[in-house]
């Protein structure tokens, strides 16, 4: 046993992005988006991700985002057509004077699109990310996710939202446990009951303390995300642990708020780099994995429709 | 020939391999060999690079998972200078290489264009757009609201009838058929709808003492309708809101929120412009009908005494009462207009009051 403990080593995750550089990217993106009446948006999104991924390093080697504006543009158009079709059907039913049926179908279709979009988004984002030349990948099954998603949504509705905590954890476990980087597999083991109690406590204490506790609630949410994540390869493992405190969150959020407000929003670039730097520096990684022999296993996947769909639906992609 | 030691990842495994990397300027290519004897050449026009801090990451466009890492300032600046000289920097990289001050300048410039567009283009376009919108649109919009409103409130039918007779005695330059409705409510207010419907609350009738005040109120509300103020307001607000959201939400949520709030303040100022216009034209209508324009200022004084809090002008949808009284006085006090006592109107006014 003692031998095993001494074999453990720490891995280093770091963020090297700088507000000043990122500001340049944000501003140039903004300029081009305004000039092109919004058509530049997919390219802007790609540039943005390229910078942020490229500024994050694991063991001093940076991640790379290989997605391009062109892929995202094609995805953007497809997503636009799909959403347009949905509205088309809704208006058709309203025109046929069957508005109730139209609205029901519309919402049903929307819920049905969600898991498909999430699936597509994960496949695209991960296949387009690499580290040390090794591609990430997402191997979840669309049908399986679709069935699970409908079941969880159904339970959430009949329990008036209480099952939402279980739904969130089931979804996250399913998604993250199918993510890999070459032959390294991710695992997430958060469970609904713990997550529910944590949120209940956070919610009640935040009310009692007029919001002050919310920073400690964030800390718990962050820790629950990070601490339950681990990486596996050939019986070797890397465990993750959050070392952030409620006070850390308080300071980070308050300073960001002041920066953004006093610069009328222009300080957004600094707030973003500060946040990422904070998160990355608060994750400790420990384990016995050999990182020099990860093998390439994943294929290329260049359909960005799901990714653009999730940004239309305003679902933030979290990895 | 520039040379350095770098790290190479072959895109098959994550094993870092030490390489000798050379920039061959004559052939315009990067050459490197690994310790295992593998030898490669990447033409300059097939590479992309990322320059982050001291690190330089070089990739091949055709084998995007292969990666060379260099941590050598001399080699990095040499390679970038070579690429620049040979026109291999993209326009995007060129913009990004501009100084921080230039980037700030760009940001200020875009903000300036947005503000100018917002203050000049939007109101002009919105005003033009209103002329294009057919009047039946105003009518159906006002009508829908009116039906809903009358259903939810109690109409005083005898006062309504008397008020309509009162208004019929006046020449109001109206472009649309007018219809007045009196609603039982203690609210000291009245408002007009774009279809020619005017709602008056019993609260405001109760505070009036003279028929010229009622004429003032009617003149004011009719002027809103004559000028299609509701539709203008709708067009300005909608286009301004779309403009602000489209321009700012691409950057971030906070800017969009700030933009929306500035827009709300701005639309209150539009609303004050419209109120002032309605005051002026309403008073002109009184003069035209031989009614004492003082009725308008008396009405405002009565409104003022019912106001509980005085809001500063910049957060109010109406100009503050003192300002309105002063504006009308400025127009009519120095050059008094002839007016005659009108017993018919006085009689109808008493019917509206009782």
Image (tube, coloured by chain):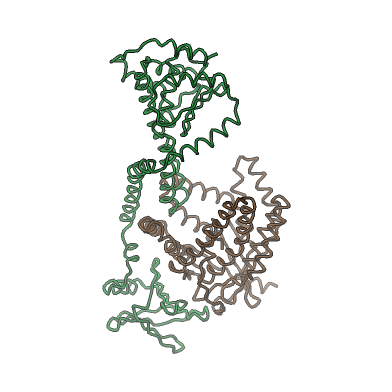
User: Does residue A293 appear in this view?
Assistant: no
Q: From the top left corner, tell me how far across and down residue A200 is, in percent.
A: 69, 48
Q: Quadrant of residue A172?
A: bottom right
Colour that chain A carries in the picture = brown
Q: Is residue B116 above or below residue B272?
A: below
Residue farthest along the bottom direction in this orientation? B37
Q: Quadrant of the C terminus of chain B?
A: top right
> Residue at point 41% right, 23% down?
B219
User: Does residue B273 appear in this view?
Assistant: yes
Q: Is residue B96 above or below residue A9?
A: above
Q: From the top left corner, tell me how far across and down residue B326 is, in percent.
A: 35, 20
Q: Nearer the viewer, residue A296 or A214?
A: A296
Q: How many marks?
A: 0
Q: Is residue B28 left or right of residue A223?
A: left
Q: Is residue B197 above or below residue B49?
A: above
> Residue at point 43% right, 60% down?
A41
Q: From the top left corner, tell me how far across and down residue A109 is, in percent.
A: 61, 59
Chain identifier for the green-coloured part of the image: B
Q: Quadrant of residue B220?
A: top left
Q: Is residue B290 above or below residue B227?
A: above
Q: Is residue B207 left or right of residue B285?
A: right
Q: Nearer the viewer, residue B186 or B108?
A: B186
């Amino acid at each position: 046993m003692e031998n095993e403990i001494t074999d453990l080593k720490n891995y280093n995750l770091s963020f090297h992005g700088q507000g000043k550089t990122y500001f340049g990217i944000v501003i140039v993106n903004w300029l081009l988006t305004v000039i092109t009446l919004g058509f530049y948006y997919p390219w802007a999104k790609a540039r943005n991700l390229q910078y942020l991924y490229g500024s994050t390093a694991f063991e001093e080697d940076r991640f790379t985002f290989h997605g391009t504006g062109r892929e995202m543009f094609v995805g953007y158009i497809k997503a636009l057509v799909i959403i347009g079709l949905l509205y088309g059907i809704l208006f058709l039913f309203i025109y046929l004077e069957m508005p109730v049926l139209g609205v029901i179908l519309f919402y049903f279709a929307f819920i049905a699109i969600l898991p498909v979009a999430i699936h597509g988004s994960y496949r695209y984002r991960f296949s387009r990310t690499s580290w040390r030349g090794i591609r990430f990948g997402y191997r979840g099954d669309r049908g399986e996710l679709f069935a699970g998603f409908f079941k969880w949504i159904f339970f959430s509705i009949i329990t008036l939202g209480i099952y939402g905590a279980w739904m969130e954890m089931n979804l996250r476990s399913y998604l993250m446990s199918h993510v890999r980087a070459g032959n390294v597999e991710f695992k997430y083991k958060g469970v609904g009951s713990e997550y529910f109690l944590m949120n209940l406590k956070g919610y009640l204490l935040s009310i009692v303390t007029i919001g002050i506790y919310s920073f400690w609630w964030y800390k718990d949410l962050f820790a629950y995300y990070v601490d339950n994540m681990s990486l596996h390869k050939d019986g070797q493992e890397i465990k993750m642990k959050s070392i952030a405190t409620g006070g850390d969150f308080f300071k980070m959020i308050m300073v960001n708020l002041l920066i953004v407000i006093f610069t009328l929003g222009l300080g957004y670039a600094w707030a973003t780099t500060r946040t990422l730097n904070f998160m990355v520096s608060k994750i400790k990684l420990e384990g016995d994995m050999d990182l020099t022999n990860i093998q390439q296993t994943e294929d290329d996947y260049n359909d960005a429709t799901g990714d653009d769909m999730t940004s239309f639906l305003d679902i933030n992609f979290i990895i | 020939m520039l040379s350095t030691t770098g790290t190479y990842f072959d895109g098959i495994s994550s094993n870092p391999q030490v390489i000798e990397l050379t920039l061959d300027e004559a052939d315009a290519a990067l050459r490197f060999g690994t310790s295992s004897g593998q030898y490669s050449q990447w033409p300059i026009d097939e590479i992309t690079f990322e320059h982050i801090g001291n690190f330089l990451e070089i990739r091949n466009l055709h084998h995007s998972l292969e990666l060379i890492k260099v941590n050598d300032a001399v080699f990095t600046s040499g390679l970038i200078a070579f690429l620049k000289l040979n026109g291999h920097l993209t326009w995007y990289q060129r913009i990004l290489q501009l100084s921080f001050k230039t980037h700030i300048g760009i940001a200020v410039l875009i903000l300036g264009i947005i503000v100018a567009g917002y203050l000049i283009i939007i109101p002009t376009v919105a005003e033009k757009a209103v002329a294009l919108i057919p009047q039946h649109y105003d009518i159906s919009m006002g009508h829908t609201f009116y039906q809903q409103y009358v259903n939810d409130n109690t109409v005083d039918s005898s006062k309504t009838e008397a008020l309509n007779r009162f208004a019929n005695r006046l020449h109001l330059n109206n472009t649309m058929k007018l219809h007045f409705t009196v609603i039982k409510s203690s609210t000291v207010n009245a408002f007009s709808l774009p279809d020619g419907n005017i709602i008056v609350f019993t609260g405001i009738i109760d505070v009036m003492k003279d028929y010229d005040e009622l004429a003032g109120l009617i003149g004011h509300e009719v002027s809103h309708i004559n000028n299609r103020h509701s539709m203008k307001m709708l067009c300005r607000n909608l286009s301004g809101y779309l403009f602000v959201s489209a321009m700012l939400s691409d950057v971030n949520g906070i800017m969009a929120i700030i933009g929306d709030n500035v827009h709300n303040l701005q639309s209150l100022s539009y609303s004050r412009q419209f109120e002032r216009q309605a005051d002026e034209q309403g008073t002109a209508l009184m003069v035209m009908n031989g009614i004492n324009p003082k009725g308008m200022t008396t009405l405002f004084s009565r409104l003022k005494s019912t106001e509980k809090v005085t809001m500063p002008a910049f957060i109010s949808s109406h100009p503050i009462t003192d300002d309105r009284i002063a504006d009308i006085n400025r127009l009519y006090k120095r050059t008094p207009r002839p007016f005659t006592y009108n017993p018919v109107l006085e009689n109808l006014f008493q019917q509206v009051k009782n």
